[in-house]
Image: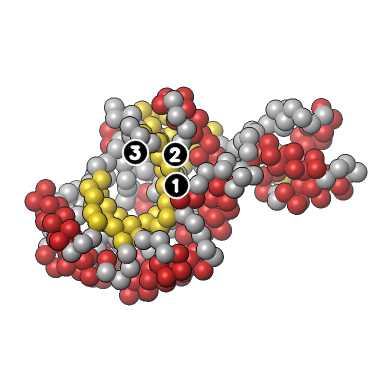
């Protein structure tokens, strides 16, 4: 019989397991602490348990932890990890350092559920969703790398790696719970940003459940015909529905929204594109990150001119909208936004 992954059990289930074997319930608390506070990858390391208890756990359970199968370091300090899962599948995660902080960019799916034409990950078949422990493990691994290479702990987490987080909603929220609670890693949810291409129903659900983390939306156009051209799923989740969901998000959370926006030559670099974005930003408090485009080899999408990007900035700022230009990190190792495609 296949052993069960022990991290699929709740604390209550661990307590019940020990009671069912004639032991005391607090043993379950001890194991839970080893798994989620101390990030144990083996039962042997659970040193406050007796040898007999550790052997019993080994007989019944496994800990399906990830392994960093390959690591690449960019000339700008960015680190990309090829992360091997227990079933041999691979995802990628990225450590992004600056002078003041270290950010973990984590994946939520093997492949992706959506079909954005400018994204290398979208060309991969979605194999499966990541489990909460597999997301948690990416954060733990990057925190260790941050301490090793930059002498400081991880400070921020963004769900901007492979996959659409809201298509793996229950597991993403369970992972965030393990990362943020005192019984887990104890990180502040205010330092976590979940980035979505825009799934209105799930944005409303997050708001209704009172989540404390931040929301970013991969927008790229506020005109339906243009957005559907580059993000075909927009035909199913049109901008009107997204707008209503974002209004609901702000009303419930009082958190402003970040719009991630790439400007491409001949696609969304016209005056009407800018005016549509300004109008979209007025529905709820927001800011815009203009992101440098990272080519994925086919030439269909080309970075817009500096003049076009400056025009976006000028018009947005003139309308009182906060805007920043986000330069890509890790381009030389295909670790930048939109480039994660398991080339290793």
Q: Residue furthest right?
A: 22
Inter-mark Cα distance, 2 to 3: 19 Å
Q: Compare residues 224 and 86 and report the one nearer the observer.
A: 224
Which numbered disc, 2 or 1, marks the residue that appears first in the sequence?
A: 2
Neighbour tally class for label 2: few under 14, some 14-19, many 20 plus, Cα within 10 Å: some
Up-down: is 168 above or below 335? Answer: below
User: Which badge, 2 or 3, comes first in the chain's sequence?
Assistant: 2
Q: Is residue 45 left or right of residue 343?
A: right
Lower sequence index among marks 1 and 3: 1
Farthest left residue?
Answer: 307
Colour scheme of the picture: secondary structure
Q: Which mark is residue 155?
A: 2
Select label 2 or label 3 by which is in front. Answer: 2
- Residue 335 bears which disc, if any? 3
* x 23%, y 54%: residue: 323
Give above or below for 278 relative to 102: below
Give the left or right position of residue 152, taking residue 11 as reference: left
Neighbourhood count class around disc 1 (C-alpha, 10 Å): few under 14, some 14–19, many 20 upward: some
Question: Does 41 appear above or below 232?
Answer: above
Residue 163 in percent (x, y) is at 43, 52
Quarter where residue 239 is shown: bottom left
Q: How many marks?
A: 3
Closest to the camera, between mark 1 and mark 3, is 1
Residue at x-position 42% and y-position 67%:
249
> Could you tell me if residue 145 is visible in this image?
no
Q: Which residue occupies the foreground of this view, 279 or 302? A: 279
Query: Spatial distance from mark 2 to mark 1, Cα to Cα?
Result: 7 Å
> Which residue does the numbered mark 1 point to in the structure image?
191
Labels 2 & 1 near each other (Cβ < 8 A): yes
Secondary structure under tag 1 reads helix
The reply to whether residue 119 is in sight is yes
């Amino acid at each position: 019989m296949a052993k069960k992954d022990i991290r699929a059990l709740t604390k209550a289930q661990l307590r019940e397991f020990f009671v069912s074997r004639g032991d005391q319930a607090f043993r379950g608390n001890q194991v839970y602490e080893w798994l989620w506070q101390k990030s144990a990858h083996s039962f042997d390391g659970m040193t406050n348990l007796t040898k007999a208890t550790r052997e019993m756990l080994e007989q019944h359970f496994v800990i399906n932890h990830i392994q960093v199968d390959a690591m690449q370091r960019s000339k700008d300090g960015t680190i990309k990890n090829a992360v091997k899962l227990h079933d041999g599948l691979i995802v990628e995660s990225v450590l992004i350092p600056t002078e003041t902080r270290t950010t973990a960019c984590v994946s939520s799916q093997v492949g992706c559920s959506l079909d954005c034409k400018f994204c290398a990950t979208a060309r991969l078949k979605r194999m499966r969703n990541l489990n909460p422990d597999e997301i948690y493990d990416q954060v733990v691994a990057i925190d260790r790398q941050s301490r090793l290479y930059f002498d400081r702990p991880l400070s921020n987490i963004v769900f901007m790696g492979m996959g659409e987080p809201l298509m793996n909603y229950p597991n993403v929220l369970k992972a965030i719970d393990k990362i943020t609670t005192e019984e887990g890693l104890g990180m502040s949810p205010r330092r976590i940003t979940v980035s979505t291409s825009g799934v209105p129903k799930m944005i409303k659900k997050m708001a209704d459940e009172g989540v404390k983390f931040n929301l970013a939306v991969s927008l790229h156009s506020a005109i339906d015909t243009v957005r559907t051209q580059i993000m075909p799923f927009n035909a199913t989740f049109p901008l009107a529905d997204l707008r209503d969901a974002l209004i609901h998000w702000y009303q419930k959370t009082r958190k402003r929204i970040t719009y991630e926006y790439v400007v491409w030559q001949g696609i969304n670099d016209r005056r009407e594109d800018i005016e549509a974005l300004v109008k979209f930003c007025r529905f709820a408090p927001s800011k815009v990150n203009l992101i440098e485009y990272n080519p994925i080899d086919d030439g269909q999408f080309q970075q817009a001119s500096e003049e076009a990007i400056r025009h976006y900035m000028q018009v947005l700022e003139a309308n009182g909208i906060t805007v920043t230009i986000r330069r890509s990190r890790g381009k030389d190792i295909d670790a930048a936004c939109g480039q994660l495609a398991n080339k290793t």
